[in-house]
Amino acid sequence: MRIQDTIDALLSADAGSRACAVRDELDAQAPEDWRALAAVLAVLFQDREICSVAVSGGQGSGKSTLAELLVAASESLGRHAICASLDDFYLTRSERRRLAEQVHPLFATRGVPGTHDVVLCRRTLVAAQQLGTVMIPRFDKSMDDRYPRSQWHQVQGPVDLFVLEGWCLGAGAQPGDLLGKPANALEAQEDPQGIWRAYVNAALDGEADYSTLSAMFEFSVFLAVPDLASVVRWRMQQEQALPVAKRMGDVELRRFIAHYERVTTWMLETVPAKADLTVKLAEDHTVSELRIKSR
C-alpha cells in the first residue's frame, strides 16, 4: 500500500492536519519519513486512547529513533509519554554468566531471547500505568551489566503512552524441525548440537514468556529490514558513531550480528502478518511501504 494511502486509512482529514502540525514541531534533524510516521502514530494513539506500543525490528532499523520521536510527538499533543528499551531489561552479567555455564557458552553474549528479564519488563509496564513512582532499569553496555537501582530512571505514573522498543518483540517460536539446520557459521561451529538455538527458541513461548510480554501491548509496529546485509551495514554505521575505544571491528561485529540472524529472518517471514503496522524499509533506510493489519 502506498504510504499516503495508509495514512489516509489511519487518520481522518482533521487528524491528518493535526499530524502535519505535530510533524513540523519534531526535530528537524531527524529523517523526514520518521518524523511523519511518528506524528501520524501519535495522533492515532491519542484518538484511539492507546496507552502501550511495542516497536520491533532488526538491528539498526531505527527502533530507537522512532520511539523517541513518537514520545516527543505525543508530548506535543499533551500526553505523558515515555519510551524504554528491551536492552535495559537484560539479565545482569552474573545471571548471564550462570546461563552460559549451565546451558551454553553462547549465552555470554547478550541480546537473544532468554537473556532478558521479561518478568521485570512486564511488571514495569503494569506499574507505569498506575499511580506512583515507576523505576525504569538502565543497562550499561560498556560494562555489560545493569546499573544499580539507585541509577535507574524514575517516572511518575500513570503514563498516557508507554513505548517499548526491542528487536525481538513479537517474535514467535519456530517449528522444531527448522532448528536442525544451522542458520550460519556461528551456529554450525559453536552450536553444532543445537542446544543454544533450541533454548532461545523455547524462550520465545516458554518459561521466559516473551509472547505474554508482546501481547500486553495494545499496538505493535514492526520495522521490516530489506535483508541481513542491510542489518550489517546499518549496524556498522551505528558503530562509527561510537567512541573508537568502544567500536567493534568488522569480524567482531559480524559474529555479534550472527547471534540474531535466525530470529531476525524468522520475524521477517512471520511478524508482518501479526503486527498492527509493518513499516517496510528500503536499502537507503527510507520508508518504502506501510502495511496495516486488517481488523
Image (cartoon, helix red, strand yellow):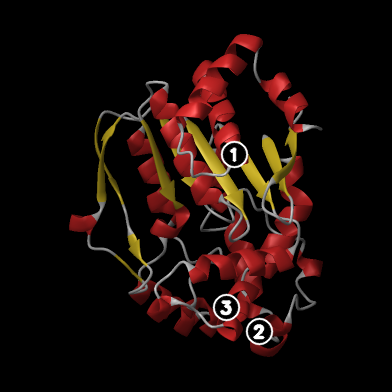
Q: What is the distance, in whole Å, between disc 2 and disc 1 at their CAs?
A: 42 Å
Asked if 200 appears above or below 214 in the picture, the reply is below
Going by the numbered disc 3, the residue's amino acid type is: Leu
Q: Which residue in the structure is indicated by mark 3?
A: 253
Measured Cα–Cα span from mark 1 to mark 3:
29 Å
* Residue located at (76% from left, 78% from top): 182
Badge nearest the viewer, 2 or 3: 3
Q: Residue at x 57, y 29 (%)?
A: 41
* In contact (CB < 8 Å): disc 2 and disc 3: no
**Picture coordinates of residue 220 (x, y %)?**
60, 38
Q: Position of residue 25 (x, y in %)?
A: 45, 28
**Which picture quadrant has residue 181?**
bottom right
The crowding category of the residue bearing disc 3, from other C-alpha atoms within 10 Å (few below 14, some 14 to 19, many at least 20), is: some
Provide the residue designation for mark 2: 191
Type of residue at label 1? Answer: Glu
Dot 2 alpha-carbon crowd within 10 angstroms: few under 14, some 14 to 19, many 20 or more: some
Residue under circle 1?
A: 32
Q: Secondary structure at mark 2?
A: loop
